[in-house]
Structure formats: C-alpha cells, structure tokens
Image (cartoon, helix red, strand yellow):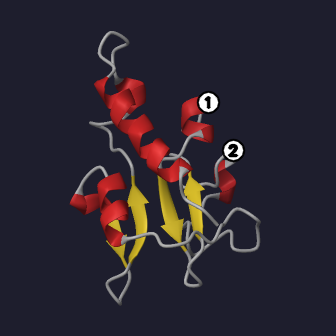
Amino acid sequence: MLNNFFTINLPYGIARTESGEWMAFNREYLPLGFCDESLKALPGYSYTHLPVYSKYKNISEGVLAKLACSDSRILRNEHGEIVRVIFYDSASNPANQPENNPILWKKYFDKLKVLSKWEV
C-alpha cells in the first residue's frame, strides 16, 4: 500500500522497454509519484504511452546487477537481457531500518548515486 513519501516517490526498481528505455518505479510498480493502485501494471510493458521512460547510454549488465538487492530480484527477457531490477526487498527495505542504524539507508542511497550519473 502506498502511504508515504518513500513508497510513492522513491525508486523500488527500474524496468526496461523493448526499445531500450528505462523507467524508475515505486513500491507498487507504478511510475514514481503515482499512487492510484487502480493504474497498477508492469513497468517495461505498460505505461509506454506516458513520458516516464528515458533512454540512457551505456548501461552495463554489471552495473544493473550491482543495483539489485539479490540475483533473484533481476528479471531477464527471453534473450537473457536484464529488463527489471529491484533495489530492495522486505528484509533490506531502508524504511524499515531503525533510525540509529543507517546501514540500509546508505546502501540504498549508494544505488541512487549510481543512477544519478546515468546520462540520456
């Protein structure tokens, strides 16, 4: 359920379209900033009619793999290409981290730092 700034506006993961564009999505697999769960669909396959995708240059599979919280949170298409990466799961959700132990927040923000350098 989307009920706070973190789950609505910060990325849970990224997904790639068949044309190579990427979209960041929130905890409910909606484009960032969306909170109407009746619009819920699959990033990478849906929302292509909306301007929520960007075509980034030279994104390697190694970088994508490092962004994933685990190998099981990487989705590949029938050609073996990475098409979706999840940044955290229930156990590594930084919003569930006690305030006096910021380790998961640091890991999450380190991933955002990597994303911040991607160029279109």
Image coordinates for residue 24, horizontal then vertical, percent: 57, 56
Callout 1: few (<14), some (14-19), or many (20+) C-alpha neighbours within 10 Å?
few
Q: Nearer the viewer, residue 25 or 62?
A: 62
Image coordinates for residue 30, horizontal then vertical, percent: 61, 54
In the picture shown, does residue 76 fall above or below 118?
below
Q: In the shown orientation, is residue 68 left or right of residue 39? A: left
In the picture shown, does residue 24 fall above or below 4?
below
* Residue found at x 69% / y 47%: 34
The N terminus: image quadrant: top right
* Amino acid type assigned to the residue bearing label 2 in the image: Gly
Task: Name, please, the residue furthest toward the top.
Answer: 100
Q: In the shown orientation, is residue 58 left or right of residue 92? A: right
Image coordinates for residue 72, horizontal then vertical, percent: 24, 61
The circle drawn on residue 38 is: none
* Residue found at x 62% / y 39%: 9
* Amino acid type assigned to the residue bearing label 1 in the image: Phe
Dots 2 and 1: beta carbons under 8 Å?
no
The residue pinned by badge 1 equals 5
Res. 95 image quadrant: top left
Reading the chain from its start, which is encountered first: label 2 or label 1?
A: 1
The residue pinned by badge 2 equals 33
